[in-house]
Image (spheres, rainbow, N blue to C red):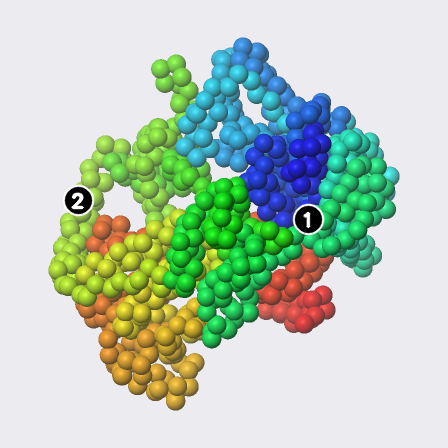
Amino acid sequence: MADIVKARGGLSVFVARDTARASAFEGALKFFAKDIEVVRLPNWDCLPYDRIGPSAGLAAQRMAALSRLAHETPGKAPQLLITTAPGLLQRVPPRAVLKAASYMAKPGQDVDVADLERYFAVNGYIRASTVSERGEFAIRGGVIDVFAPGSEEPVRLDLFGDTLESIRAFDPETQRSTKQLQAIDLLPVSEVLLDDKSIARFRTGYVAAFGAPGDDALYASVSEGQRRAGVEHWLPLFYEGLETVFDYVGAHCLIALDHLALESREERLSLIRDAYDARVENAKARAGSTYKPLPPEALYLTGEEWDERLAGHPNRRFTPFQQEGEHVVDLGARLGRNFTTERAQDSVHLFEAAGDHARKLASAGKRVLFASWSEGSSERLGAMLADHGLKNIRLAPYWDAARAADPKIPQRVVLPLDSGFETDSLAVISETDILGDRLARPSRRRRAQNFLAEATALTPGDLVVHIDHGIGRYAGLTTLEVQGAPHDCLELHYAADSKLYLPVENIDLLTRYGAESEGVQLDRLGGAAWQSRKARAKERLREMAEGLIKIAAARMTKGVEETEISAGLFDEFCARFPYEETEDQLNAVADVLGDLAAGRPMDRLICGDVGFGKTEVALRAAFVVAMSGKQVAVVCPTTLLSRQHFKTFSQRFSGWPVKVRQLSRMVSAKDAAETRASLAKGEVEIVVGTHAILAEQVKFQNLGLVIVDEEQHFGVKHKEKLKALRADVHVLTLSATPIPRTLQMALSGIREMSIIATPPVDRLAVRTYVTPFDPVVIREALLREKYRGGQAYFVCPRINDLPTWRSCCASRCPR
């Protein structure tokens, strides 16, 4: 594809079958052809005819791409627009509207703040207290912050009166300026522009399409100039006519279709038709339904229109299979071998099979390359292959490896491929072929902590505690003029109508008030009551700290056997983890391994949110200890969690000389007795269970590590038993919400702590919406979760409603 785009010059389009494929193609293109400029046009991330519209960030990305195509004149430099089949089906606003919807300003020009605020409202910008996401703006006196679509950073406009003095880009995390700009060019954020003309067209088109509006909240909101969630699904009513991506790119633009792109188009058209029919049927069944859908052809291209418009452009269709056709491009390659069978068989060693396959390919005259996602994973793969007979595999840049002098010597490369491939002279074996599917993402530089994060989390009326002045009430952010310049301060109210203005950069002096706020008496500024309370609290903390420090000192001076394991075995176990480790995960693993090899009992807390990878850290610690000949106890607060961990540990340790057993009230008496006997004899290396592990009749032959999951759920009696175990063994505690004492001990250094704050790949924030009752939305949500293989919770306000809703949900989502 890169060669075709370079040879043609100008703009070309690649239509991927879905978003994941588009992202993979974009990453590969940036690797192989960095000189090709890439423009990404995503499709909506909401369902057709939904109650909600596309997310703000994605809508901003779409408008940045469309505005760029509308404003730029096609040149000779190679440029590629990457979109998806669903994205190409969507109709979009006219180019003329986007050309007229930009806003430009330079230092020295007059800026009417009221006009600029109207521009933000018309074009879909969202007012925020602190600008951090695309499409947000904030106005604080003569300082205007805005994050425009297509910009890498938000900008800050400094006004002196009505004159624009300066434009500065700033870091959204630290809120600090990064560079001066000579101009600003704002673009629309939403595809729905709510100016007077578009509102009038909407009102006229709505009545023409659906008749009298009645009590439709959508009609009422738009008529008042308010933007309502999901208004994008009535996009045709706001314009005289919509256009398509085909119109934006021009008649001479090459359009290349991904393999299965046409099948993806048909699937999307079927989904659109099904959603439309469900809306129509619901409107007929429920007289009070106010959702009035537009016909699919008004919002999307039909299959016939797609074919007609595609035929008017030079086009190519890519396929991995041997085919003949005028517009079909044979890639000249086929998928390589996948080692799925070897991964499923414990009797066949995976890396020996990969090495044998590579040697066979090399003897057949093919150049063999092992492709990995990163240098670290490539080094780990090379070490494991070297342990199983394929030694001296050098890591080299892809183009150097592909043209190496001796083609019979396999080499390693960093190449982001989901699967390997083979040609007549080249064979690429990807790490996903060997290890299975892995979710990877590019590493990101960690930014400094945002000092405004806590201020934006506060709401007026919240109680806060100032380290020097005590309990006060937060009243909001206030802009004060200090030495002729505006300065943001937090306004705090204290007793006797006293006020304190705290600069935002000193917010670290504040903490939230942790107890009930009702009936709390505010402190007096300059009074002695707060200082005396602080002194008494310090004395109590000092006494508690002395006892804890004595315990910690005893553990620090007590020696235990150092626990280590060979790098090859450990890397081979880690390779079974089907995800790309986050930076925090790797740091936590390194901390735990360092503790195990330090020669003293470990007492470490792993703190991280649910799903952030704490269990993987525990698995690797358990592997090191179990392979050193010692036993591991995994203690869980509930039988459900115990069963989940037992399943996870059993799967990960399958094929290793490690025996994993379960011990809880859900285990039969016979199995429990066998487990206890095996633990006493040392025949079981890992036991997973509830507080039953802490019973007096459970004896270990050589216990080396205790892993406590969710320690805050254990009672005092169980914690006393854990304390007895801690004297001689390593202890690893996992928790998303540690109790204050545990957290304080970790923060003060009495216990060690590792924080996993980086979310895993594809972990998205939960989007919550409050919408009118809609059976179509309920049906779609239940069906999607059912087909995903997940579970859905439907919460009813009254117990009497349970039978009704159960029958209703069963009829809409049958088992």
State the image quarter where residue 457 is shown: top left
Q: Quadrant of the C terminus?
A: bottom right
Q: Give the CA distance from mark 1 to mark 2.
A: 76 Å
State the image quarter where residue 88 is shown: top right
The residue at 57%/12% (across/down) is 110
Amino acid type for the residue under numbered disc 1? Leu
Residue 676 as seen in the image, left or right of residue 15: left
Percent x, y for residue 640? Answer: 45, 72
The residue at 39%/14% (across/down) is 484
The reply to whether residue 726 is visible in this rendering is yes
Kindly state the secondary structure of the residue where label 2 is placed.
helix
Of 342 and 266, nearer the camera is 342
Percent x, y for residue 756? Answer: 38, 52
Amino acid type for the residue under numbered disc 2? Ala
Residue 426 as seen in the image, left or right of residue 639: right
Per the image, the residue denoted by label 2 is 535
Percent x, y for residue 433? Answer: 54, 59
Percent x, y for residue 212? Answer: 84, 42
Per the image, the residue denoted by label 1 is 331
Dot in front, 1 or 2: 1
Kindly state the secondary structure of the residue where label 1 is placed.
loop
Q: How many marks?
A: 2
The residue at 55%/66% (across/down) is 340
Circle 1 crowding by C-alpha within 10 Å: few under 14, some 14–19, many from 20: few
Residue 728 as seen in the image, left or right of residue 193: left
Q: Closer to the N terminus: mark 1 or mark 2?
A: 1
Q: Is residue 170 positioned above or below 572 on the image?
A: above
Q: Is residue 487 positioned above or below 578 on the image?
A: above
Q: Quadrant of the N terminus?
A: top right
State the image quarter where residue 282 is shown: bottom right
